[in-house]
Image (tube, rainbow, N blue to C red):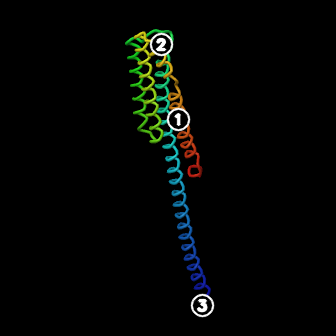
Amino acid sequence: MDQGMAAVAAGMVGLIGAGIGGLATAYGARVGAQKTIEAARTQVDRQATAEHRHWVREQRRQAYSAVLEADLVLTMAIDGCTSDLYKGTALSEDAVSSMGRHIKNLATAVTRATLWGPDDLIDKARDLIGARGRAIGKTVAWSMAVASGNAEAVRAAVNGMTGAEDREATRAFVTAVRRTLAEAATQDHGPETAQ
């Protein structure tokens, strides 16, 4: 074989080798790009999940805060009524109506919170409504006793106003809120979103 043919053969082998090398490089670049795209998608999915959890936690916090605010307004109305009753003054229709409006506001706030759950927390919120409803009933009964002038009925009504059920209902609801929000915060910052 003469040198010209050898040079042509060597050139062809080099050209084929360059083509194969180019194909391998292109394939490697393609695989690398696919892995980069997959990693970006995974990161975007995780970020979206974390953002959604954060949004849900914020919605819950607002809903639970509205329940606590409505409960505080109702509790202040009941306390104002009992203060008058301790002074021996029967409640006006306006005072009784005010307690009724405030418990409706509490019930509305609890109803809105049911959208965000969880069920055990909503059960505690409903227990709170029940406790406040019973406190209103006792307050109205006390007012009726004051209005009747029956000292024995007034003493019995005063003795029935311990407030223990109210405090327990509030404590149980607040504990459930704290637990729920803490669990959600842990999920937001857990290992599945940290990667």
Where is residue 112, by image quadrant? Answer: top left
- Along the polypeptide, which appears first: circle 3 or circle 2? 3
Residue at x 42%, y 9% (from the top left corner): 149
Real-space CA distance between mark 3 and mark 1, rounded to the nearest whole angstrom: 97 Å
Q: Are marks 3 and 1 in contact (CB under 8 Å)?
A: no
Residue at x 55%, y 43% (from the top left corner): 183
Helix, strand or loop status at disc 3: loop
Residue at mark 1: 172
Q: Nearer the viewer, mark 3 or mark 2?
A: 2
Q: Which residue type does callout 3 highlight?
A: Met
What percent of the width, then of the height, locates residue 158?
49, 18
Q: Which mark is residue 1?
A: 3
Q: Is residue 151 above or below residue 106?
A: above
Q: Is residue 179 above or below residue 147?
A: below
Helix, strand or loop status at disc 2: helix
Residue at mark 2: 85
Q: Are marks 2 and 1 in contact (CB under 8 Å)?
A: no
Q: Is residue 72 above or below residue 59?
A: above
Real-space CA distance between mark 3 and mark 2, rounded to the nearest whole angstrom: 123 Å
**Residue 74 or residue 63, whichever sits in front:** 74
Q: Which residue type does callout 2 highlight?
A: Leu
What percent of the width, then of the height, locates residue 167?
53, 28
Q: Which residue type does callout 1 highlight?
A: Ala
Q: Is residue 164 left or right of residue 107?
A: right
What percent of the width, then of the height, locates residue 4?
59, 84
